[in-house]
Image (tube, rainbow, N blue to C red):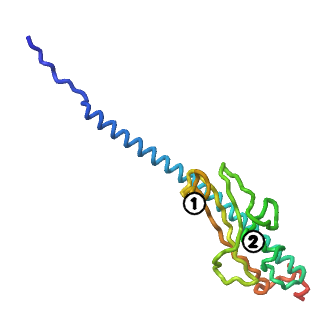
């Protein structure tokens, strides 16, 4: 007596292979999306910190300019405070640039000491703006705060271009146009206390 095998339902080898291929593509795509999202979030955090550091240096530059103007008003001096001399903006106008140390209200020559935040090392320097937006005179100064940092997830230049090993270099800049506007803005004599106002 012959028995006929009933057809058994099951997956063939081709169906299993196709299912595994679809699963693999789905997992790889999901991993790529998650990885890209992490990298973009990390890079955004780095850039935000760099902009903060540049803005902090520019704010100190403005405060320094304001202190020079206040001192010039108190001394009844009409000498423009924006002339680049070592006692004011000379360091910042030089090729090496300048920076403000933490807690300092006067610029120092050259770039700042590296600042480490969140495991990333940032380099900050203020220098002359190569192509100022306005015509620079003795009453005006054009500067740019540049922050650079190396990141393993950044999309900056390759290591071969920057001299770094195995990282990408990222840079952000913030322009600052400083004006000594003592001659164009009327002063409040009660606030300034200048004898020229009488």
* Residue 52, quarter of picture: bottom right
Q: Pinpoint residue 171: horizontal percent, then vertical percent.
A: 61, 62
Is 107 rendered above or below residue 22? below
Q: Pinpoint residue 143: horizontal percent, then vertical percent.
A: 70, 73
Nearer-N-terminus badge (2/1): 2
Mark 2 Cα shell of 10 Å, populated few (<14), some (14-19), many (≥20): many
Whether label 2 touches label 1, CB < 8 Å:
no
Of badges 2 and 1, nearer the viewer stands 1
Residue at the disc numbered 2: 92
Which label belongs to residue 102? Answer: none
Query: The N terminus lies in which quarter of the figure?
Result: top left
Q: Pinpoint residue 73: horizontal percent, then vertical percent.
A: 86, 81
Residue drawn at x 70%, y 73% is: 128
Q: As drawn, is 34 to the left or to the right of 149?
A: left
Q: As drawn, is 147 to the left or to the right of 69?
A: left
Is 73 rendered above or below residue 161? below
Is 20 rendered above or below residue 77? above
Q: As drawn, is 96 to the left or to the right of 46?
A: right
Residue at the disc numbered 1: 161
Q: CA distance from mark 2 to mark 1?
A: 26 Å
**Secondary structure category for the residue under label 1:** helix
Is 3 rendered above or below residue 170? above
Q: As drawn, is 135 to the left or to the right of 80?
A: left
* Residue 98, quarter of picture: bottom right
């Amino acid at each position: 007596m012959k028995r006929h095998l009933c057809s058994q339902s099951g997956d063939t080898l081709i169906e299993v292979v196709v299912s595994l291929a679809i699963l693999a593509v789905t997992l790889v795509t999901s991993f790529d999306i998650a990885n890209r999202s992490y990298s973009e979030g990390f890079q955004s955090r780095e850039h935000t910190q760099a902009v903060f550091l540049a803005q902090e240096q520019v704010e100190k530059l403005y405060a320094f300019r304001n202190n020079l103007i206040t001192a010039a008003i108190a001394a009844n001096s009409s000498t423009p405070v924006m002339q680049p001399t070592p006692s004011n903006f000379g360091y910042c106008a030089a090729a090496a640039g300048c920076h403000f140390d933490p807690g300092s209200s006067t610029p120092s020559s050259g770039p700042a000491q590296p600042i480490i935040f969140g495991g990333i090392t940032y380099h900050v320097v203020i220098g002359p703006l190569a192509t100022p937006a306005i015509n620079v005179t003795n009453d005006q100064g054009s500067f740019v705060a540049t922050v650079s940092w190396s990141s393993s997830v950044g999309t900056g230049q390759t290591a071969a271009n920057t001299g770094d090993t195995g990282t990408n270099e990222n840079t952000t800049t913030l322009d600052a146009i400083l004006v000594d506007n003592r001659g164009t803005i009327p002063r409040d004599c009660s606030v300034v206390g200048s004898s020229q106002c009488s």
